Image (cartoon, helix red, strand yellow):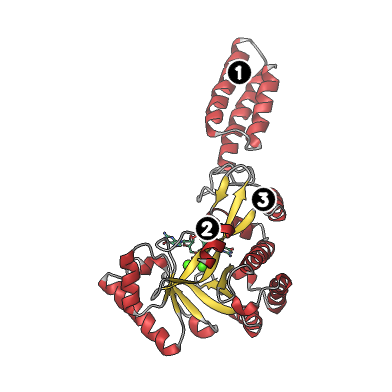
Amino acid sequence: MTPAVASRSMVFAFARGALTPVAAAIGIVLAMLLAAMAVWGGLSLAWWASCFVAIMLVAASQIVHRPWAGGRPTDTGQPGRRPSETNLKRDIRRAIARGEFVPFYQSLIELRGGTVVGFEALARWRHPDHGLVQPDQFIAMVEDAGLMHEFGASIMRQACRDALRWPRHLRLSVNMSPTQLGGRVAARRMLDEVRATGFDPHRLIVEITENRLIDDVVLARATLGVLRRAGVQVALDDFGAGFANRHIREIDINAIKIDRSMVQRAGALEVGNIVDTILSWSDASGLPVIAEGIETIEHARALFELGCDYGQGYLYSRPVPAPEAWQLAWQ
Ligand code: C2E
Ligand code: CA
Ligand code: CA
């Protein structure tokens, strides 16, 4: 390979983001060597200039391909490089079509007797190269790719099918992103998905998160209204995670999930007081409260003493694949 071809192909590789920062350093050294060779070998000024441009391009490509703040995996699966939008969309769409996104299930427990009353579906990506990927690594990517409806429908379909095999008194809770609160048509489409599986919408709870909940309260109310009329219940997720809790009055809610940041400090006096207030208020309004993130007997005891009826957390079970959830359901 001539120095010219070598330096040009290197520049293209960097421009495509195909090389790593270590390779970038090697590239810079090589480019400088080429420049030196050009000068010592008496090559023209144009040669020297092209090497200089190569170095500049290398540096620029490193800035263009700087790591994402969150270090999320990309279309190539390499953490730290932002994929192009088309690639991202294509890869997520393909992963949905191949059934790589699957629901795991975490049991919802009645604290008094420790019995299972239902399961929350929590999505996982069974990535062919990277194994099991957690939702905080891909939910935002699905949102970015504009494929939340397709993703949500796929998880909902699989979860309803799995839940059909559980005892009939058990509930299924499914997380819904704010982008899925797209109005009546979106809600009817979701109900069609549920009914097509044969699952009774009266056994379904959708969990919506307050922090990102509602840019458009009217649209959200319309969406949830359609679901509720079909018997679906609505739970407000991550309650007490530091948001205004204002939607509780604006939207019909059937249950509240206390955020794990509060649950895990429920023994501490000031947090205990807040949880106590939430529970007394929920008692008055008749809304059941579910405590998230119960990891220890102490958490469970503190919450139960404060009057909380339901909970979930690693103390009872981590999120598990469908066959294990089935076993827990029939225990
Ligand atoms: P979330 O809905 O608040 O789910 C509860 C999270 O807490 C889950 O994390 C669960 O694994 C974790 N967790 C449960 N018990 C404990 C515990 O005792 N200790 C600790 N430290 N953590 C516990 P996961 O599965 O990583 O899900 C993260 C978030 O991703 C979920 O938070 C939810 O907002 C989102 N998500 C998951 N699946 C879906 C989905 O299908 N659709 C949408 N839109 N969002 C989803
Ligand atoms: Ca949830
Ligand atoms: Ca939550």
Taking the image as shown, residue 105 lies to the left or right of residue 189, namely left
| Residue located beneath label 3 in the image | 88
Q: Is mark 2 within 8 Å of ligand 1?
A: no
- Residue at the location (45% across, 87% down)? 286
| Residue located beneath label 2 in the image | 320
Element type where label 1 sits in the image: helix
| Residue located beneath label 1 in the image | 34
The residue closer to the viewer here, 217 or 107, is 107
In the image, residue 194 sits, relative to residue 76, either above or below, namely: below
Instruction: Name the amino acid, label 1.
Output: Leu
Instruction: Name the amino acid, label 2.
Output: Val
The residue closer to the viewer here, 80 or 151, is 151
Mark 2 to mark 1 CA distance (whole Å):
56 Å
Query: x, y percentage for residue 266?
Result: 32, 70
Query: x, y percentage for residue 258?
Result: 42, 73
- Residue at the location (65% across, 36% down)? 15
Mark 1 surroundings: few (<14), some (14-19) or many (≥20) residues within 10 A: many
Determine if residue 247 is in view: no
Q: Is mark 1 within 8 Å of ligand 1?
A: no
Mark 2 surroundings: few (<14), some (14-19) or many (≥20) residues within 10 A: some
Instruction: Name the amino acid, label 3.
Output: Leu
Query: x, y percentage for residue 73?
Result: 57, 47
Of tags 2 and 3, the one toward the viewer is: 2
